[in-house]
Image: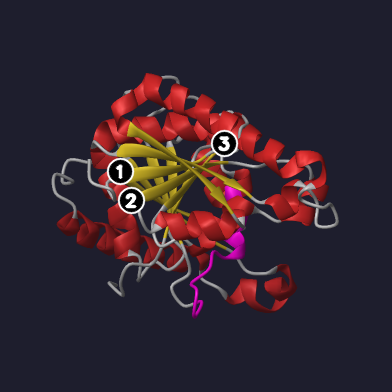
Amino acid sequence: MAEHDRILVGIDGGEGGRAAIRHAAERAGRSGAGLWLVHVIDLAIATGVFYPYGYSGLADQIREAGATALEHAEKEAAELVGAENVTTTLLDGGVVTELVHAAADSTMVVLGDERHHGLSRIVTGSVTGRVASRAPVPVVIVPAAWPDAREARDARMVVVAVADCDTSTDLVARALAEAVDRGGGLVIVHGWDVPAVYYESTLGQLDAAGLAADARHQLMQTLERARQLVPNSAGVDAWIEVRRGQPARVVAEATKKAALLVIGRRGHAFPLRRLGGTGHALLRESACPVEVVPPVSSTP
């Protein structure tokens, strides 16, 4: 196994980390990649910024607890993919910074979700959202309660959310490749709406049916271009859904019977191309794992 031919799994010691291991193991089984389990100890957060690191050996106890969590995760992963396909690393530093830096030495990052109480999110921020916004490789966020592929309602259906119908070939190709690997189908979803403040002045003048038909036509063209990029994709069944509604709600509804949702990062958010508001909402609301794909080119 080459050093970069591995999936980085963020270990948090909780159910989210275990769900991430299961999902990463399933993908590794299809791709032949190894699993790289990483736990990051951020002492500034773990002990509190006003708490002395050396007090009663607290820092050492925290590191020991992190090493123990990593050891347990290694055993779980070894049962799924074999011990020879698992490596582990314990890092000190900022969680987001260290995970994003380590991502460059992997093909993908898989993290468990962190749907914890609001106060905790205010204090620490969203690790998953920030890693997904910055990593140079795709990042998958797995709901803690997500079952493995054998138990999922439809372990083969892939949904891809498209915001710009005319410039999403690479994103659709990524989702299509996933559908090929899973032996399943693809659903391309585009949600659109007019902000409420403009309803009276704008909505009555819109040709909603015409807009939907135009979007569908563009997405069909995008799909055909994507098929040319993905070997063995001609036989993949694909459906196009164009719905009026708040985009995050439209896409979240489509994930209820899916095994994976694929979304893209903003290609125009210079210089870091961050995840937008809809993307962050989907990390919280999707009923299935979400793969966030960084922009890879300007392919239309």
At a point 49% along the width and 40% down the height, the residue shown is 289
Numbered circle sitting on residue 143: 3
Q: Amino acid at mark 1?
A: Glu
Marks 1 and 3, how far apart in space? 19 Å
Callout 2 environment at 10 Å: few (<14), some (14 to 19), or many (20+)? some
Residue under numbered circle 2: 107
Marks 1 and 2, how far apart in space? 14 Å
The image quadrant where one finds the C terminus is bottom left
Callout 1 environment at 10 Å: few (<14), some (14 to 19), or many (20+)? many
State the extent of the magenta-drawn residues as a range: 269-283
Frontmost of labels 3 and 2 is: 2
Residue 132 locus on image (x, y percent): 51, 57
Residue 139 locus on image (x, y percent): 45, 51
Numbered circle sitting on residue 106: none
Q: Earlier in the sequence, mark 3 or mark 2?
A: 2
Q: Amino acid at mark 3?
A: Pro
Q: Nearer the viewer, residue 145 or 278?
A: 145
Q: Is residue 271 magenta?
A: yes
Q: Is residue 273 magenta?
A: yes
Please give left or right for residue 238 compared with residue 141 in the image.
left
At a point 49% along the width and 80% down the height, the residue shown is 270
Q: Amino acid at mark 2?
A: Thr
Frontmost of labels 1 and 3 is: 3
At a point 59% along the width and 34% down the height, the residue shown is 16
